[in-house]
Amino acid sequence: MIDVIKMTDLEYLKKYYKGNIEEALIRLKSGEPVQYIVGDVDFYGNIIKVDERVLIPRFETEGLVELALKYLDNTNLDIVDIGTGSGCIAITLKKKLPCINMDAIDISEDALTLAKQNAELNNVEINFIKGDMLKGINKKYDFIISNPPYISYDEDVMDIVKNNEPLNALYAPNNGLYYYEEILKNCKKNLKNKYYIFFEIGYNQGEKIKELALKYLACEVDIKKDLQGFDRYIIIKSK
C-alpha cells in the first residue's frame, strides 16, 4: 500500500494524524485529501480546520494574504473577505492586524459554521455574514479581498480535487470570470473613496479581470505573479 502513496502525504500523516494510522492510509489510498484526513492545515502559521465543507487552503492564497499585508496597517480599517470558506484569509488578517474591523461573507451555512470554529480556535473576533457576495450589504469598506471560485467548467482539474472538494468553491460560469464581474459591478456602493480590492485569480485571467475592473470602476489595476511565475493576483486601487 505504502509504495503507491505520495511520500509527502505519508509524512504529513505520520507527523500530524492523531488517529489510527492504518485507517488513515486506507482513506489516503482511496483518494481522500490528506488535509481532510488530518482535519486541519497550517495556513500562514495558523491552524485552520478543514473538511469536505470547504476548499483546502493553498499556498497561492497565502501569497494573497502576504500581498494584502503589504498594503494594510493596524488601524481602524473596514475589510471584507468575500467567499470566506474556511475563514483562513479573514482569520490571518485579523491575527496580524488586531485593530482592523473584519467581516467575512459566504453563501454556505456549512462553510460559515466551520469558519466560526476556526475563528474561535485562533482567538479572533470576526463578523461572519451569510450572503451572496455583497448583495444586501450596505456597509462601506476600505479593503475588499476575495479568492472566489474561478475555474472554468471545461478546465482540467485533478481527480483528488474535483472528487472531494466542494464544487461550488471551485467552478464558476463565464470561463471562470462570473464572480469577479459580480463583485466588480456591484461593489461601488460598498467602497469608501479610497479603497483597495485584492483578488486571487486563475493564471490566464489577469487581463480579462483588469478589463472588468476598468469597466466598472475608476481605478488603477496591477497584476502580480505567484512564486511559480504565473499571474495569480490582482490589486485594484482607487484613483
Image: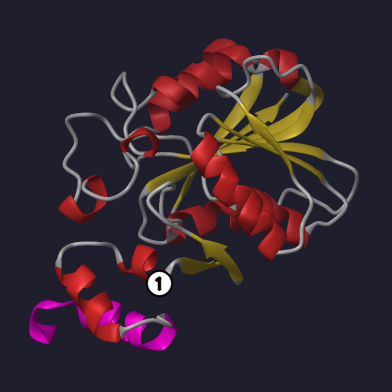
Extent of the magenta region: 1-16
Picture layout, residue 57 above or below residue 212: below
Picture layout, residue 131 above or below residue 7: above
Q: Residue at x 17, y 30 (%)?
A: 154
Picture layout, residue 203 above or below residue 213: below
Q: In the displayed structure, does residue 230 sit left or right of residue 109?
A: left
What secondary structure prevails in the magenta region?
Answer: helix
For the rendered model, the colour scheme is: secondary structure
Residue 238 position, x and y percent, is 72, 26
State the residue in front, 197 or 239: 197
Q: Is residue 13 visible?
A: yes
Q: Residue at x 15, y 65 (%)?
A: 30
Picture layout, residue 37 above or below residue 233: below
Is residue 14 within the magenta segment?
yes
Crowding near pointer 1: few (<14 within 10 Å), some, many (20+)?
many
Q: Residue at x 90, y 43 (%)?
A: 76
SS state under label 1: helix
Residue 228 position, x and y percent, is 35, 60
Residue 147 position, x and y percent, is 50, 40
Q: Quadrant of the N terminus?
A: bottom left
Is residue 112 within the magenta segment?
no
Residue to which mark 1 is pinned: 38
Q: In the displayed structure, does residue 48 sit left or right of residue 188?
A: left
Q: In the image, what residue type sits under mark 1? A: Val
State the residue in front, 233 or 139: 139
In the rendered picture of this protein, how many numbered marks are placed on residues? 1
